């Protein structure tokens, strides 16, 4: 495993390789990231993992400052999984790069964008830079951040990049809680609470074959767990990210909520 900190070096390396898998991360790696890396190792000849906490996608400075930093553990995991290259840039290396990607998809004012103004602008900016720096064949991303995934897929399509986005299943622990880097900020009983929320969503989705979607019904069930703040619970059509009331095989229930001051998202 080689650690590369300079954009021009990783760009040159990837220009000379074929069938490259890219796993962009913000560090604090967990089994969800590991599953992306393993799939990349299986589907491509070389795997590159980037670790870069992007300040532009945090709409609260405190959230950026408290984001988990586990770089030693991250590098150890990458080495264990036999990652070929870890791209470990600083802010200048990412944003001083002259990106060839200029067209940006339109961001709809629903869910994450409604509650985190500017968040997706930051995501698209950093991915435009990273996909311009790293010449990859496939990008591996998880479905937990589904809105982000859809926007990056549109970014790739709009700019006619020779890159395919591979959608990967959300990895969960035994109680149903989705793995997230932010879970490192939670206590064990709070992780248990996350599992309870996921179970409510899962059970309600089964009921939706017979009833129309009612967000207040779910919210009340979740409030009864002791959770005090929910940004949204919506039934969303996956290909358009529009709100619907009837379930189909192309809909998921999306949620954003807080345990203490830690914001968590999921979709079932």
Image (spheres, rainbow, N blue to C red):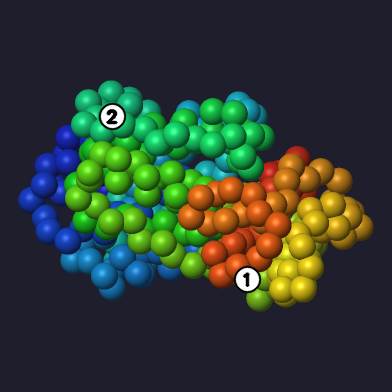
Q: Position of residue 83 (x, y in %)?
A: 29, 61
Earlier sequence position, callout 2 versus callout 1: 2
Q: Which quarter shows the N terminus?
A: bottom left
Left or right: 223 as drawn, with respect to 46:
right
Crowd band around label 2 with a 10 angstrom C-alpha radius: few (<14), some (14–19), many (20+): few
Residue underneath mark 1:
173
Q: Give SS at disc 2.
A: loop
Left or right: 57 as drawn, with respect to 227:
left
Q: Which label belongs to residue 160?
A: none
Q: Nearer the observer, disc 2 or disc 1?
A: 2
Q: Position of residue 132 (x, y in %)?
A: 24, 38
Q: Position of residue 78 (x, y in %)?
A: 36, 60
Count how many numbered circles sit on residues in the image.
Answer: 2
Q: Residue at x 22, y 45 (%)?
A: 161
Q: Of 104 and 63, which appears nearest the observer?
A: 104
Q: Is residue 14 above or below residue 7?
A: below
Q: Quadrant of residue 114?
A: top right
Is residue 203 visible to us here? Answer: no
Crowd band around label 1 with a 10 angstrom C-alpha radius: few (<14), some (14–19), many (20+): few
Is residue 149 visible to us here? Answer: yes
Q: Residue at x 57, y 52 (%)?
A: 181
Q: Residue at x 79, y 68 (%)?
A: 211
Q: Position of residue 91 (x, y in %)?
A: 37, 28
Q: Is residue 69 above or below residue 179?
A: above
Left or right: 135 as drawn, with respect to 119:
left
Q: Of 149 and 80, which appears nearest the observer?
A: 149
Q: Residue at x 69, y 52 (%)?
A: 234
Q: Which label belongs to residue 102?
A: 2
User: Label 2 vs label 1: CA separation?
Assistant: 39 Å
Q: Quadrant of residue 138?
A: bottom left
Q: Which quarter shows the C terminus?
A: bottom right
């Amino acid at each position: 495993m080689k650690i590369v900190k300079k954009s021009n070096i990783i760009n040159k390396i990837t220009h000379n390789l074929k069938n490259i898998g890219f796993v962009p991360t913000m560090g604090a790696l967990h089994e969800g990231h590991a599953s992306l890396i393993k799939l990349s190792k299986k589907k491509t000849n070389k795997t590159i993992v980037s670790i870069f906490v992007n300040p532009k996608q945090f709409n609260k400075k405190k959230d950026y400052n408290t984001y988990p930093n586990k770089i030693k553990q991250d590098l150890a995991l990458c080495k264990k999984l036999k990652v070929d290259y870890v791209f470990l840039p600083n802010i200048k290396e990412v944003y001083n790069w002259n990106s060839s990607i200029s067209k940006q998809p339109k961001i709809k004012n629903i869910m994450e964008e409604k509650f985190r103004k500017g968040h997706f602008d930051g995501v698209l900016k950093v991915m435009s830079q990273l996909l311009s720096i790293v010449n990859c064949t496939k990008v591996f991303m998880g479905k937990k951040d589904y809105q982000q995934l859809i926007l990056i897929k549109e970014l790739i399509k709009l700019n006619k990049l020779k890159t395919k986005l591979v959608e990967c299943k959300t990895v969960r622990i035994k109680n149903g809680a989705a793995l997230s880097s932010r879970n490192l900020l939670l206590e064990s009983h709070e992780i248990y609470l996350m599992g309870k929320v996921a179970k409510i969503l899962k059970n309600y989705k089964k009921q939706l074959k017979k009833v129309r979607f009612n967000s207040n019904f779910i919210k009340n069930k979740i409030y009864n767990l002791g959770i005090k703040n929910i940004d949204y619970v919506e039934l969303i059509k996956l290909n358009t990210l529009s709100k619907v009331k009837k379930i189909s095989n192309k809909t998921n229930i999306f949620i954003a909520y807080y345990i203490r001051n830690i914001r968590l998202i999921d979709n079932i």
